Image: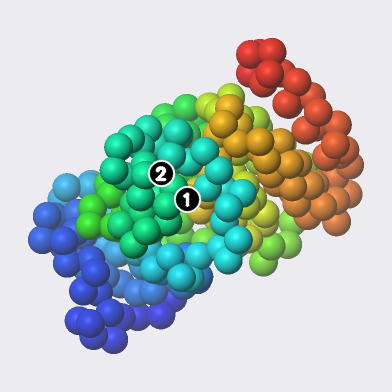
Amino acid sequence: MHRSQGRDQISELDGLIEQGFVEEVLGLVRTGKEASVYCCRSGLAVGADLVAAKVYRGRQYRFKNDAVYQEARAREMGLRGRALRAMEQKSRFGRQVQEGTWRSREYEVLRELYNAGADVPKPYAAIDGVILMEYLGDEDGAASQLNRVRLDHAEAQVLFTQLIDTTELMLACNMVHGDLSPHNVLYWQGEVRVIDFPQVTDPRFNRSARELLSRDVENICRYFGQYGVEASSGGIVFEMWERWERGEL
């Protein structure tokens, strides 16, 4: 973990510090095209020891082709009036609205999935464009991405089942991750957590949802296949989707 070197690096977290959600920023965990994540010592308002603070970057760093994720996003978020028109017209204000939907959507998704029992980080708060959530790891280092760990066959089988179950639970909640891969799964002491949800889509409104679900499941099956876990991604998706359409999930 990289330690903070100065006040400038944590200025975006001032609001959380002032409101008692964060006591101290310990360091940068990771940074990417979408956001930077910091390890923080939590304040009294949270009650945990360590927490992760996800600070979003500007939209220019996002998915270069996010149209497939944005389809029907306005309906999912219940946008109306000026906000809806601006988003459809892709005006400056519309881009700001769109940016806001990514941020608010991730927090709401985390909260709903965590309450449903999915293997996702526990969300604590969303303030000033920052999401505060459960931190996986300790002060010596953060949890690894799943693609960076080595598993034996028995553990791989267990974790594969957990991730497929979480994918199915998401679908039962009318959600498809849309970017699920070993890069977006954290591993810590035998446990996994699925992360990064701003692009989650609602299969009731997005015509590409089944295609996105198939890609998610294929990624998971391909990764665990190297450990001898045998599974048909097509069969899993077919059964999962059929049960969802029949309202049996």
Left or right of residue 120, residue 139 in this image = left
- Under mark 1, the amino acid is Pro
Label 2, residues with CA under 10 Å away: few <14, some 14-19, many ≥20? some
Label 1's element?
loop
Residue extending farthest to the bottom is 5
Q: Which is nearer the eye, 94 or 35?
A: 94
Label 1, residues with CA under 10 Å away: few <14, some 14-19, many ≥20? many
Report the residue marked by disc 1.
198
Left or right of residue 80, residue 213 in this image = right
Label 2's element?
helix
Left or right of residue 226, residue 56 in this image = left
Q: How is the image coloured?
A: rainbow
Q: Is residue 169 visible from the viewing direction of this image?
A: no
Q: Is residue 167 above or below residue 100?
A: above
Q: Position of residue 50 (x, y in %)?
A: 32, 58
Query: Which residue is rendered at x = 13% and y = 55% of the image?
Result: 20
Report the residue marked by disc 2.
105
Disc 2 + disc 1, Cβ < 8 Å: yes
Q: Is residue 16 visible from the viewing direction of this image?
A: yes
In which quadrant of the rendered view does residue 208 lie?
top right
Which quarter shows the N terminus?
Answer: bottom left
Q: Position of residue 233 (x, y in %)?
A: 83, 40
Residue extending farthest to the left is 18
Q: Position of residue 72 (x, y in %)?
A: 52, 38
- Label count reads 2
Query: Which residue is rendered at x = 44% and y = 47% of the image?
Result: 88
